[in-house]
């Protein structure tokens, strides 16, 4: 007679229709889980007669030795600062970080996820470049826990370290409207990204509070890269001076820098003729002429907290994973915003 295969945590996750991280949270008491999902996990444990493998759990509770870090690209200083935070947390525990940059290899993130999994990593810190990559996420979850940074992906019950992008965008846009601007345009990020959605929502909330019709505000979708900022600024500012926007709300600093480059090439003075804001507060943003008004995200701290949360998942104890939650985003007022120019 064939021996019945011992059920695994993956079997429990599939039966309960939840992620492996959720099963781990319930069984180890290491994180908050909605009551309905907790009941599904416990029902699956009972139906499958699952019992944790004592030796395997002992091995799992050892210190991590190698983790993965997926970032879309390194030309964006924000990603580099997050990576520094992850590396600092890992170095404190003598853990090796395997860095994967899909844009640099010109391979899809799903392929990179498969390669990471082959390295038998203990877990992964993940920064999404597109906002909707279920195949890559599922592939990574087969290796161990996944912690997201600066993103939340619908349909995935994953721990995440994020910033209050909506509030930050609302406050920086309010600063623009308080200077008297009424003709504005948004240069937003990729529509599928949670961060881009949150920032656009914040801009619209500030516009509504200023008495503007949010449906009348042009929204041009970029890709968070400098080149798209320059291209979309040229598109937004193509009309006559009396009709074009007097302010651009850019969803990150790189696109704001691209917009500033276009303005200099086109002879549009910032902030005398056009006000400009960004988001992230890259180190270069305070060195531009004019210095860029923007929203600061604590990128280094976000990376450090994400790695710490991952280690807490790998080495569960009595406390929930540390470092999770929403961090504040703070407006940095500089020189790129001024009242709109008086015609003539």
Image (cartoon, rainbow, N blue to C red):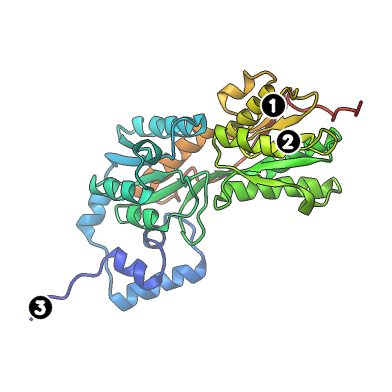
Residue 87 point in image, percent of width and height: 38, 31
Q: CA distance from mark 3 to mark 1?
A: 73 Å
Tell me the quadrant of the picture where the C terminus can be found: top right
28 in relation to 237, above or below: below
Q: Secondary structure at mark 3?
A: loop
- Give the left or right position of residue 95, taking residue 170 as reference: left
In percent of the image, x 68 and y 40: which residue is there?
Answer: 168
Dots 2 and 3: beta carbons under 8 Å? no
Residue 263 marker = 1
In percent of the image, x 76 and y 49: which residue is there?
Answer: 205
Whichever of callouts 3 and 1 sits on the residue coming sooner in the sequence is 3
Residue 315 seen in the current view: no
Whichever of callouts 1 and 2 sits on the residue coming sooner in the sequence is 2
Residue 141 point in image, percent of width and height: 35, 55
Residue 237 seen in the current view: yes
- Give the left or right position of residue 337, taking residue 323 as reference: right
Q: Secondary structure at mark 1?
A: helix
52 in relation to 119, above or below: below
Q: CA distance from mark 2 to mark 3?
A: 72 Å
| Relative depth, front residue between 90 and 134 | 134
Residue 72 point in image, percent of width and height: 44, 40
Residue 237 marker = 2
Crowding at dot 2, Cα within 10 Å, few <14 / some 14-19 / many 20+, comes out as many
Residue 26 point in image, percent of width and height: 41, 62
Dots 1 and 2: beta carbons under 8 Å? yes
Residue labelled with disc 3: 2
- Give the left or right position of residue 235, taking residue 280 as reference: right
């Amino acid at each position: 007679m064939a021996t019945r295969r011992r059920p695994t945590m993956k079997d429990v996750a599939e039966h309960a229709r939840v992620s492996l991280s959720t099963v781990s949270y319930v069984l180890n008491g290491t994180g908050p889980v909605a009551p309905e999902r907790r009941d599904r996990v416990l029902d699956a444990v009972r139906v499958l007669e699952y019992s944790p493998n004592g030796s395997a759990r002992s091995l799992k509770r050892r210190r991590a030795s190698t983790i993965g870090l997926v970032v879309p690209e390194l030309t964006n200083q924000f990603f580099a600062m997050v990576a520094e935070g992850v590396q600092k947390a890992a170095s404190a525990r003598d853990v090796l970080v395997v860095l994967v940059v899909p844009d640099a290899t010109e391979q899809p993130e799903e392929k990179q996820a498969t390669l990471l999994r082959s390295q038998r990593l203990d877990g992964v810190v993940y920064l999404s470049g597109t906002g909707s990559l279920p195949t890559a996420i599922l592939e990574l979850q087969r290796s161990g826990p996944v912690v997201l940074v600066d993103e939340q992906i619908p349909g995935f019950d994953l721990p995440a370290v994020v910033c209050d992008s909506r509030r930050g965008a609302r406050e920086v846009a309010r600063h623009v409207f308080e200077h008297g601007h009424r003709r504005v345009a948004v240069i937003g990020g990729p529509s599928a990204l949670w961060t881009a959605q949150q920032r656009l929502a914040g801009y619209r909330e500030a516009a509504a509070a200023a008495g503007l019709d949010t449906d009348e505000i042009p929204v041009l979708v970029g890709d968070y890269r400098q080149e798209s900022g320059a291209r979309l600024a040229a598109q937004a500012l193509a009309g006559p001076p009396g009709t074009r926007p007097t302010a651009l709300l850019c969803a990150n600093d790189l696109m704001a820098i691209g917009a500033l480059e276009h303005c200099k090439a086109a002879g549009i003075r910032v902030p005398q003729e056009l006000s400009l804001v960004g988001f992230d507060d890259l180190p270069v943003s305070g060195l531009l002429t004019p210095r860029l008004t923007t929203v600061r995200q604590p990128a280094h701290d976000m990376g450090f907290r994400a790695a710490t949360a991952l280690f807490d998942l790998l080495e569960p104890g009595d406390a929930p994973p540390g470092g999770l939650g929403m961090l504040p985003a703070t407006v940095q007022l500089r020189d790129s915003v001024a009242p709109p120019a008086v015609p003539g």
